[in-house]
Amino acid sequence: MDRRRKNHRREPPVLRPEPWLVYSHGKHKKSQTFYSSSERSCQVRNIRKMRNRTIWAHCQGWLVLLDIDHGDCSLFNPVTMEELHLPRFPFTAKSIDHCALSSPPPDDNCVVMCIEYCGRRKQSSFHFCRPGDKDWTTQLVKPQQGQCWYEEDTHSFHFQNIVSFNGEFYVVSECCQGLFKVQLAIDELGTTNNDASMELIDMKLRGPGDHFVSSTMMSSWFMVQASPTELMTVKLYYGDNRDTDSSFKVRSVEGFKIGVKQLNLYKANFQERKWERLETLPEDTAIFLGSNSDNAVSYQIPRRQEFDVGGGLVRGNTVYFTTTNAGYLYAYDVGDRSISVSLVCSKANRPDYSEPHWIMPLGCSSSTDDPQREFEISPDEIGNEQIILSSTTGNNNSSSTTDHDGRHWSYDIPSELLFDVQSRLFGADRCFFRLACKTWNSTFSRVVSTSSNDRFARNHSFPILLHRGMNGEVVSLFNPITSVTSILSFDAWSLRDAVIRCSKHGWLLMSQGLGVDQLFFFNPFTKDRINLPMLPYDFEGITFSSPPTSFNCLVICYSAWWQQMVISFIYRGQHHWTDYPVTSYTSDFMSPFSNPIYHKGLLCFMGKNADLCIHDFEQRTTKTIELPHRSCTSVQRSYLLECNGKLLSVLIGHMGKVLEVYALDQEAITWKELDDLEDNMLFVSAASALSATNSGEKISCLGNKVFLDRFKEKDGVFYSLATRKFHTFWSGYNSDDCCNTKEFINCAWIEPSFKTHTKDELQWW
């Protein structure tokens, strides 16, 4: 039995035709971990033909494998175990930026193509070969002025992506983000040779415009063939929030490429020569993105009898993506623009683990009755590598008890009393209380209509979380105390592509447009709008001092011009923005996850390493206050807010494993860590950070908590400084980190305001 089990581990798992995530690890990369996207489980194998080899590319079930140490290259099918050897790679494999496979063998058009960029010579080389060739063919693309891929300033050019579309290669120029078709010259025998040549054909498609992109943000551009006639592009924008010291040297990369702030989808229109923005994916389509920009898979979820869409846990209209050496899988829901995260490989952060790669096996059976299933490795044997994540829902099917009038006994209990009783319960008791009857369950999780929005918001003085979907027609208002969601409806075009940038005093400060953004204030409760003068550039953070209808309202933002920090401001009544540089800081200092705050006449904002910058707006002087000590070695998110006249900062480490709150001692000009917020509550999100006090409310047990823009299913997640854990009020959830939760991208905490204004007050000048 042991011998059969050992032999079994040398074979790949039963690979269904669905996306699988593959990690190579161990000494000489002798082991491979296969993660099933539908079952959400890991299986470890020791496949001899994959040892000490890196997955370069894949196409329709075939992998391009490369031995980095010796240059051996081959095509490998993990389902049939078939291997085709390619010529030994004569170049430095580590210098290869991109690789793609045009079509699977034995197709006559099967070609492997690699792109190498030499920074010293400022030129790109294309290497390609076919099965049966004796050597690789190299084509050097020489810089030529006038070509759109040529960068005039540096006299260089670089290609940032390559994709196989209907058996032909397409590349993207980093300079102009133009799409080019790679035309290969193939001889009559169908094999490449040393005299073969290639040509780049300009498809006249330029990169889609970047919206809400700043210099502190980075991007990854993925191209994927979604169908035989459809080439799609996914642009992923994230913050480079690596922890740095005073000289801006990286101290930790734990937070690198996390905190996604935007994800855009485009479809290539070859006839009109443009990229068309997509607001949604088909309900049965999911896209999987790897840590390398060449690794993208489109998957059409099969319909099965026992499921509406999908036979497992893969959701349609969703983009899944991974990060480098982290072991986490992120799922971006295109419909509601939320990102959920789960741990798929707990050991992926070890140095012996390679970057994960998505593969799509073909030609294998999807039957679950395969006899090899009896040899599936147990979690104990693989050191808890097999992680199965699943969600269950409970149904209360018990019959209701009615009185003589036919009314349920729970109808006459005031909801305020239910909320007060629930607030005094903890853990599983909250869940049992909620499931006592259908009426109570619906009371705590209902979604109310537009007609009850005003009553819902007026009855609660706490901030509520506002979230916009993709089309802008519907705005959701979530009460974190009651888990009640309210819906507001708007004209689809009035808020189309609008991004929430800041929230204070019951108003949202939003931007709208591409390139030159239109800034405007918006009150979602009264639907009042105040337009601001155009700002001809994007910015890192923005805030305002008072309600926009007040005569002394001041709007301040900071941005980066050529690595130099620039502060811009405008007062109510002015027609133009005023700019001036701050020479003591560079763009490397600024964090993409923290808005500034205008506190007692001072502009305060957080840096990447959680240092506080205080800028005197009148004297135009700056100073920095460093944290003397903090537990989190890598700050993923940082927030500034005012609470009872004091300036507070909230620091959140990687995946929320550390959350710390500090108060600024303005006399000693130092930070002091807070272990207890007493009756105060903090509400933090990327666009806003607010505070509230619970002392005057009927609902108890709400103080000493930090409410986040995260959800566990339908319940809001908060952090308790008393327990040092994350909780929800209704589901009994508690955790040491915020893994297996989701957050909304375009959301903000807001204090409901229903004050009416005159026509003159709604004019900025």
Image (spheres, rainbow, N blue to C red):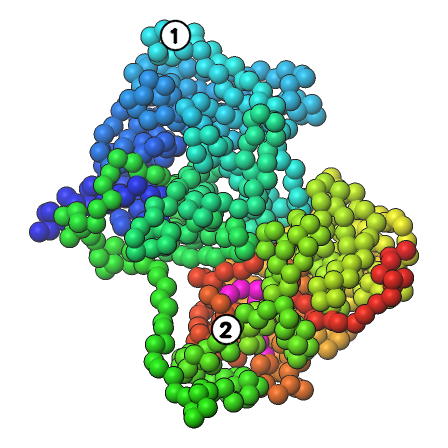
The quadrant holding residue 663 is bottom right
Residue at x 46%, y 30% (from the top left corner): 229
Residue 581 shown in magenta: no
SS at mark 2 in the image: helix
Coordinates of residue 251 in the picture (x, y in percent): 55, 52
Q: Nearer the viewer, residue 446 or 35?
A: 446
Coordinates of residue 715 in the picture (x, y in percent): 50, 70
Q: Nearer the viewer, residue 51 or 446?
A: 446
The quadrant holding residue 277 is top right
Residue 647 visible in image: no
Q: Nearer the viewer, residue 445 or 598?
A: 445
Residue 397 visible in image: yes
In this rendering, the answer to whether 715 lies above or below 489 is below
Q: Which of 733 and 624 is in front in this view?
A: 733
Q: Which residue range is magenta in the image?
A: 704-711
Going by the numbered disc 1, the residue's amino acid type is Asp
Q: Residues within 10 Å of mark 2 (few under 14, many from 20)?
A: some
Residue 710 shown in magenta: yes
Earlier in the chain: of badge 2 and badge 1, it is 1
Is 765 positioned to the left or the right of 29 in the image? right
Coordinates of residue 227 in the picture (x, y in percent): 43, 34
Is 597 positioned to the left or the right of 323 in the image? right
Going by the numbered disc 2, the residue's amino acid type is Ser
Disc 1 target residue? 187
Residue at x 26%, y 48% (from the top left corner): 44
